[in-house]
Amino acid sequence: MDCKKDQNLDNCNCTYRGCPRKGVCCDCLQYHLRMKQLPACCFPDEVEKTYDRSFAAFATAWGL
């Protein structure tokens, strides 16, 4: 399977400058799960900008 990085970038809301995983969703997801976090795309834009990618921040953002 080929990476669809160019297409993924159209939907990536990550604001972390210089991220080497931007648009490479499989690497991004593995990285954040290893850190016990979720990637930017799981958060509304205003929450993503805080860089708090924790599961607790996810639950709060979505009212869970």
Image (cartoon, helix red, strand yellow):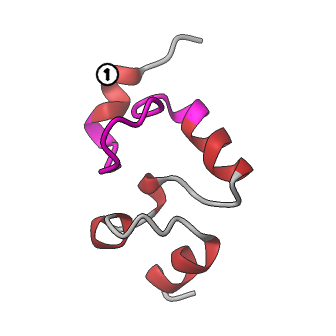
Find out whether residue 24 is within the magenta segment.
Answer: yes
In this view, the residue farthest toward the top is 2
Measured along the vertical axis of the image, is residue 1 above or below residue 22? above
| Residue 18 percent across, percent down from the top left | 34, 35
Residue at image x 51%, y 85%? 60
Magenta residues?
Answer: 10-27
Q: Quadrant of residue 10?
A: top left
In the image: residue 39, left or right of residue 31: left
Q: How many marks?
A: 1
**Quarter containing the N terminus:** top right
Disc 1: CA contacts within 10 A as few (<14), some (14-19) or many (>=20): few
Identify residue type, mark 1.
Asp
Residue at image x 37%, y 64%? 48
| Residue 47 percent across, percent down from the top left | 36, 72
Prevailing secondary structure of the magenta residues: loop
Q: Secondary structure at mark 1?
A: helix
| Residue 43 percent across, percent down from the top left | 42, 65
Q: Nearer the viewer, residue 22 or 26?
A: 22
Measured along the vertical axis of the image, is residue 53 above or below residue 56? above
Q: Nearer the viewer, residue 12 or 35?
A: 35
Residue at image x 48%, y 69%? 52
Measured along the vertical axis of the image, is residue 40 above or below residue 58? above
**Quarter containing the C terminus:** bottom right
Which residue is labeled 1 in the image? 6
Residue at image x 59%, y 32%? 26
In this view, the residue farthest toward the front is 18
| Residue 40 percent across, percent down from the top left | 44, 55
In the image: residue 54, left or right of residue 45: right
